[in-house]
Image: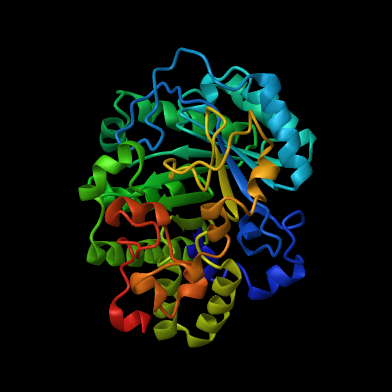
Amino acid sequence: MIGISKLYCNQVEPSDALRYGRHSGKLPSHLLQFSADKKPVVVWNMTRRCNLKCVHCYAKALEEHGTDDISTDQAKTLIDDLASYGAPVMLFSGGEPLVRKDLVELAKHATSRGMRAVISTNGTLITKEKARELKEVGLSYVGISLDGLEEVHDRFRGVSGSFRKALEGIANCQAEGLKVGLRFTINKRNVGEVPGVFRLLRDLEVPRACFYHLVYSGRGSELIKEDLDHKETRTLLDLIMDETRACFDAGMPKEILTVDNHADGPYVWMRLKREDPKRAEEVLELLQYNEGNNSGRGIGCISWDGQVHADQFWRNHTFGNVLERPFSQIWEDTSIPLLHKLKDKKAHVGGRCARCRFLNICGGNFRARAEAFHGDIWAEDPACYLTDDEIK
């Protein structure tokens, strides 16, 4: 994650990471990426079932009704292991996590073990009662996916009325005092909706939004041609920075992050070098703390069937199964070649990444995209939009 509001609008100082000691157990959520111990935030795709039919679903979700591979008791054992291991955050995802009747029970189990519990949801199933239950168990955050305003969103989600239901879910979370934010996956079909999403943030008084660059996996792999080209991506980043600054200057600051393209960090830094050189120096320090893409190190994924992956998008590589062996043992196993190499990707990446001056703050970007595009795990990420002159 690249904190646009933190970096570009100076909402976090470099000393914050030092003041918090850089230990994940003590860091607030927005500074976990700067932790020194790097115990992974774990995404658990707790179900493959979903009530929508999103065109870019990385999980290739199935129908809403059915059964799940991991039982409630098995899930609690999984959570116990993660808590003992020191994983700071449990992110419940899917499919759609709210189709599982035991979500609230499992979120409560995670918080009772000292973990922060968050959910990634389409928002349509968050009734007033469900929002109240989630608040009562100490859920830290609800991320609700929107792909634009009503017409575009409903077309992406494949179900008419999903936009209005998502807004109801947001309102129900707000009524209970749950922190809620928006998740927006960028592509050619919806990039024009970004200003509208910022208007929505202001109008609904939503404090946070994450803009996700497209990753070529699941049904998203069918959208490679829908990804922005490099010029379009640069234009988008400038727009996001401009919109974030406008909110900040208007006294309505929003927490804005971009996700899944670590070229964004150097791009923000280069713009600040032109606009505010002193702040650019501070931003470079924060980016070095961040260390770039964390797949297989600072983030991990457990799939609906128990398989362990480097992240939620990269499912064609499996390191083990939590139904057979605890996550903590799998994650620390140095005999798993790819997982071991991902702990220090910088030593293995090739192409432009290997000779890039920003490698120490980008970490080689997304290996899933490199493999999907080039057929080579260690090739350069095709979504890196920095020029050859900029990376010298």
Q: Position of residue 391 (x, y in %)?
A: 36, 80
**Relative to 191, 365 lies left or right:** right
| Camera-nearest residue between 43 and 378 | 378
| Residue at the (51%, 54%) spot, across then down | 338
Q: Where is residue 153 in the image (x, y as percent from the top left)?
A: 31, 35
**Relative to 326, 8 lies left or right:** left
Q: Position of residue 190 (x, y in %)?
A: 27, 46
Is any part of residue 108 visible from this angle?
Answer: no
- Residue 332, above or below 293: above
- Residue 66, above or below 381: above
Q: Give the image's coloring scheme.
A: rainbow
- Residue 89, above or below 54: below
Is any part of residue 109 visible from this angle?
Answer: yes
Q: Give the quadrant of residue 244.
A: bottom left
| Residue at the (43%, 30%) spot, across then down | 166
Q: Where is residue 218 in the image (x, y as percent from the top left)?
A: 35, 37
| Camera-nearest residue between 34 and 15 | 34
What number of labels is visible? 0
The single residue placed furthest to the front in the displayed view is 335
- Classify the position of the C terminus by image quarter: bottom left
Q: Give the quadrant of residue 179.
A: top right
| Camera-nearest residue between 175 and 87 | 87
| Residue at the (64%, 48%) spot, across then down | 331
The single residue placed furthest to the top in the displayed view is 66
